Amino acid sequence: MDNQSNYKAFRVEEKDGNFISSVKQIPFTKLEQGEVLIKVHYSSLNYKDALSSNGNKGVTRNYPHTPGIDAAGTVVSSESTKFKESDNVIVTSYDLGMNTDGGFAEYVKVPADWVVKLPENLSMKEAMTIGTAGLTAGMSVLKLTALVKPADGAIVVSGATGGVGSTSIAILKKLGYKTIAITGKESEIDFLKNLGADEIMMRKDVEEMAKRPLLKPLFAGGIDTVGGVILENIIKATAPMGVITCCGNVASPKLDLTVFPFILRGITLIGIDSQNYPMSYREKVWNKLANEWKNDGLTEASAEISLDELSDKIDLMLQGKLKGRTLVNLDL
């Protein structure tokens, strides 16, 4: 820390009902028992960060606040036996960047129980390209592939151009699965095919499937990132003994279903809770993402920005105009 008393952070403040963001110098606070102080080298911009930066009280209750649900860096001080100075580490999810100051800062202070050692075969930049979205994809793939094998048939992935969906397709392709990507963006069909999707289904076609309790089996399993009618129809169109994971509700948190897919076809629906995923599984997924699941071109579609450029990128994300991963380089 070079004996400095302040550090730079992207702060969001509430003033007269408006939310204003800027890069500020803020003071260090005392490290409590069981906490570690991390010098952040990379973070990444996620939709939840954009909501927090825009004053969404469903994400962040109290302001001023520093968003950033992902961080990768080096431990500079530790009040825990789990980590020592100079350990390279990753922090994702839990309460980071939500109601605990997050990774859009030069330093972050967190409980050691939230921290994962950076796998040897992964750089900090690669880890933040993966981020919470890639970790969620890894969790989904781990659960799904334990019960469904490539020979069983195709795996459908909704929200396929998003972080979770695109990473899921890339991993499944590497593991030898046939994949079907669901997207609402015709302009991204080539992107999805290059990623490894064997077939493309347009979102409107899935939404307009027949309103019957069961549909013709099309999938051996699925990874759903959107919820609502898309998830309903994936469940209804999954073959007997199929498995579906779900991790999002951007379309809707509600499901309008009968129990028939579950009791007549033996379908399994697995919820993915990436925020509080047990550490033993978290470490297992990170190590797989760094080794046998690793995408060799991981950082090719990512863009690096500084803290000073965050506001503009957040605006673009909220307008749906940001493509690919945006990494925040705290050393710029």
Image (cartoon, helix red, strand yellow):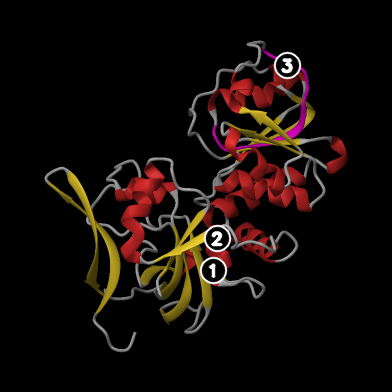
- Disc 3 marks which amino acid? Leu
Q: Residues within 10 Å of mark 2 (few under 14, many from 20)?
A: many
Q: Position of residue 106 (x, y in %)?
A: 36, 72
Q: Residue at x 85, y 36 (%)?
A: 152
Residue 215 marker: 3
**Upstream in sequence: badge 1 or badge 3:** 1
- Secondary structure, mark 1, is helix
Residue at mark 1 to residue at mark 3: CA–CA distance: 43 Å
Q: Which residues are magenta?
A: 213-226
Can you identify the residue that label 1 sits on?
A: 125
- Disc 1 marks which amino acid? Lys
- Secondary structure, mark 2, is helix
| Residue at the limit of the structure toward the right, as seen here | 151
Can you identify the residue that label 2 sits on?
A: 129
Q: Nearer the viewer, mark 1 or mark 3?
A: 1
Q: Position of residue 198 (x, y in %)?
A: 77, 39
Whether residue 151 is situated above or below residue 283 in the rendered picture: above
Q: Position of residue 138 (x, y in %)?
A: 65, 52
Residue 173 within the segment the image draws in magenta: no
| Labels 2 and 1 touching (C-beta < 8 A) | yes
